[in-house]
Image (cartoon, helix red, strand yellow):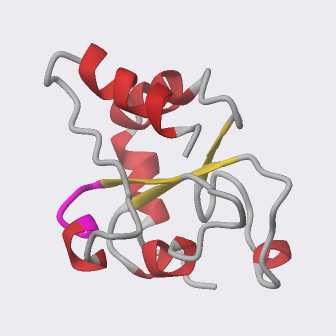
Amino acid sequence: MKDATPLMSLAHDQNNIQKVYFHCFTQCLSLFYQFKYQINIDGTVAAYRFPYLLAGDGVVFKQESEYYEHFYPELQPFVHYIPFKHDLSDLREKIQWARDNDDKVNDFLYVFI
């Protein structure tokens, strides 16, 4: 998965200040729900776990992507999820924004589709 390396570098660069958990398809979804921030990254297709992450109680960061699922038109950025660039170049900035705006981000947790 070509996108894994930048994400893992980001996690390493944070010096354990920010926990970043990489969502690998071999992991159990219940583990993801232990974290406030859920990072959704596509593979060779749209990430199948996205609707499951939305159903959890964390804030979902979604990678911009050419791939889509049938329900994507019903979703709104900064309402249902926080978007970040496909190349992950602004992911650190978006995580920091979420940390700095915890009150706004907590509103995401109560939006139902």
State which quadrant residue 77 falls in: bottom right
Horizontal side of 57 relative to 87 (left or right) equals left
Q: Position of residue 79 (x, y in %)?
A: 63, 60
* Residue shown at the point (82%, 84%) measured from the top left: 70
* Residue shown at the point (56%, 52%) measured from the top left: 41
As drawn, the residue found furthest toward the left would be 16
The main secondary structure of the magenta stretch is loop
- Magenta stretch holds residue 100: no
Name above or below for residue 2 compared with residue 113: above
* Residue shown at the point (58%, 58%) measured from the top left: 81
Q: How many marks overall?
A: 0
The part of the chain drawn in magenta is: 32-36
* Residue shown at the point (35%, 42%) measured from the top left: 102
Q: Position of residue 40 (x, y in %)?
A: 52, 56
State which quadrant residue 46 falls in: bottom right
Q: Position of residue 18 (x, y in %)?
A: 22, 30
In the foreground, 40 or 101: 40
Q: Quadrant of the C terminus?
A: bottom right
Q: Position of residue 62 (x, y in %)?
A: 60, 52
Name above or below for residue 93 compared with residue 47: above
Horizontal side of 34 relative to 32 (left or right) equals left
In the foreground, 102 or 25: 25
